[in-house]
Image: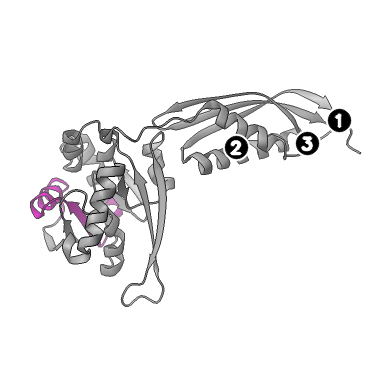
Amino acid sequence: MKVYGLSGKSGTGKSYRAAELCGRLAIKAIIDDGLFICQNELCGISAKKQLTKIGAVKTALFTDDAHRDMVAARIRETDPESVLVLGTSDRMVDKIAERLGLPPVCEYIHIDEISTADDMKRARKMRSEAGTHVIPAPTFQVKKQFSGYFLDPKRGFRSVANSRAPISQDKTLVRPTYSYLGSFNISEKVISDIAEHLAGIIPGIADILWVASSLSDEGTYIRVIVQAEYGRNARRAALQLQSQIAESVAYMTAFNVLGVEVEIREFRFVNLE
């Protein structure tokens, strides 16, 4: 396994540039802020979920044995040909690699070698003014850890040398807990409005009688009680409503939808002619 290091001060755009660098050097995996990212799958605990910056640094360094063991085991299982380790310095990169039992770093890359001064200035501004950080992975993976926090998917396409087609780069912007800017909640009325709108366009659903949702760090669970139209396939209508509520709430809010329960409480006779 080849281990590469990408180092630079906090807020200079390391995570943003990581996917592009991996495409250029054909690196298969990334270790960034406590996460092991390989083929768009995440393993670990994000430092951006910690309540303090000190806690974030400890998580990024894998100081907790259980966290370290989980990620190290996943690396052994995946066995990527190469991995990019992100850190604020070469020394930090070495500490992370040693902590995870990786081979010595074969090449160090510094952020100012792959990013312009203007780009780093914009990255610092985004960090200081908006409190946003980048995770080099798609939102559908990141939101499992960050439901209830600001999430903004970004996709870019960059041409890479010796590549016939541009490489797709999925990134997610988040506002970490320790920035004190990022946590947000969705009113139950928003979810009930989505459910009522969908009920109005799905054949077989006469009315929404009740909607409730419960939110946790892992995501949201939604329960809906409906009135079905007598004479139609009520089960099919309920399954369609269940699927579309889950898809629409996830798309509109970026929340991780843990489940949607649809209960048919009563029927209404309607004219089917």
Disc assigned to residue 137? none
Ranked by sequence position, the earlier of labels 3 and 1 is: 3
Q: Amino acid at mark 3?
A: Asn
Left or right of 259, for residue 143: left
Disc assigned to residue 245? 2
Residue stretch in magenta: 77-102
Left or right of 24, for residue 229: right
Local packing at callout 2 (Cα closer than 10 Å; few below 14, some 14-19, many 20+) is: many
The coloring applied to the image is: one colour
Point out residue 9 in the picture as x, y percentages from the top left corner. 15, 51
Asked whether 132 or 121 is in front, the reply is 121
Local packing at callout 3 (Cα closer than 10 Å; few below 14, some 14-19, many 20+) is: few
Q: Residue at x 41, y 58 (%)?
A: 155
Q: Residue at x 29, y 32 (%)?
A: 180
For marks 2 and 3, give the one nearer the viewer: 2
Point out residue 3 in the picture as x, y percentages from the top left corner. 18, 60
SS label for mark 1: loop
Q: Residue at x 72, y 34 (%)?
A: 235
For marks 3 and 1, give the one nearer the viewer: 1
Asked whether 52 or 19 is in front, the reply is 52
Question: Label 1: which residue?
Answer: 270
Disc assigned to residue 233? 3
Q: Tell whether position 92 is magenta.
A: yes
Disc 3 and disc 1: Cα gap in Å?
A: 13 Å
Quadrant of the image for the C terminus?
Answer: top right
Ranked by sequence position, the earlier of labels 2 and 3 is: 3
